Amino acid sequence: MSQIGAQNLKQMNAFTVDVEDYFQVSAFEHHIPKAAWATQPQRVAGSTSRLLDLLERFQICGTFFTLGWVAERNPQLIRRIVDAGHELASHGYDHTRVTEMQPHQFRADVIRTKHLLEDIAGKAIRGYRAPTFSFTRDNHWVYDVLAESEHHYSSSVAPIRHDLYGIPDAPRHAYRHRSGIIEIPLSTVRIGGINVPCGGGGFFRLYPYPITRWCINRVNRREAQACNFYMHPWELDPEQPRQSALPLRTRFRHYLNLRRVKARLERLLSDFSWGRMDQVFLSGERL
């Protein structure tokens, strides 16, 4: 594996979105099974549109890792994403974690989703992000599948310790796998020998905003590296239907500070320079 830099764009960070509805998160899978998805109130088009409006106001383009299930039902939303200059990328078809798939199942999933997104958008799909960052030490065959299916990069590794995902000793910055696929991990800062996540998601809602800003500044200035930040459209939707029968930990993780996200996001978009994943990490790549 060799380190990949973005030296000419080192102060620009990648803004990414996992386009999935509130009921499609892995933490809800035992409470809202896939067979019941079509019966749930569909809110992803509205919440994604609000995010697109916000990015347009700040004149920022990002990368939208989109579920095939969502794209199939919302082709106009997909076209709006692409027409606005954002990069469209794959999040798999129905948010099945890679740890639950065999190689042939993963291959079928990524090819199906890639073709579906390309048919709707009329653009080549280069990037892939595994649901719930589910690339592990035990499924490195995933990179060969991505290369065979003509993907160029992945953003599927979290180099942290977490009860749901993570490879704590993985490289913290973008690197090229032997397959040729570039892996762009979730951003972290190294504090006291521990990788502390600062790349968004639930951590963006958990930390007071000054902590997030300090972490990104540290990666940009001390390490001269770009950050890889992500969020979900449902995090801009505090009015989403509440699920009552969830474990306390799941309720805390999913609903924490939803009403504060918009204001924090506006500060984040204003405080840093943002771009698409391919602009930040692929334009200036070096072996």
Image (cartoon, grey):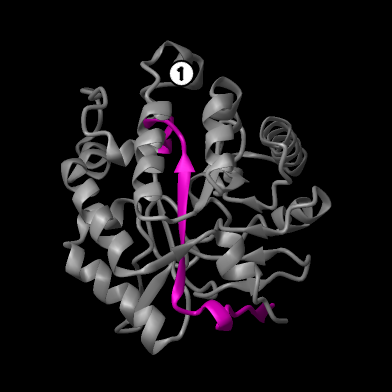
Q: Is residue 84 visible?
A: yes
Residue 7, quarter of the rendered image: bottom right
Determine if residue 194 is in view.
Answer: no
Which quadrant holds the C terminus? bottom right
Q: In this rendering, would 38 be left or right of 139? A: left
Q: In the rendered image, which quarter contains the N terminus?
A: bottom right
Q: Three-letter amino acid code at disc 1? A: Trp
* Residue 242 sits in quarter: top left
Of residues 229 and 283, the one nearer the viewer is 283
Is 78 covered by the magenta stretch? no
Tell me where the magenta segment starts and ends, as one range: 1-26
Q: Is residue 22 magenta?
A: yes
The residue under the point 77% across, 71% down is: 178
Estimate the x, y position of residue 36 in percent, counting from the top left: 45, 14
Please name the residue that numbered disc 1 is placed on: 37
Image position, residue 79 (x, y; %): 59, 33
Please tell me how many numbered marks the rendered image carries.
1
Q: Secondary structure at mark 1?
A: helix
Q: Is residue 19 left or right of residue 237?
A: right
Q: Quadrant of residue 183?
A: bottom right
Determine the residue positioned at 56% across, 49% down. Answer: 85
**Is the residue 227 above or below the residue 77 in the image?**
below
Q: Nearer the viewer, residue 204 or 224?
A: 224
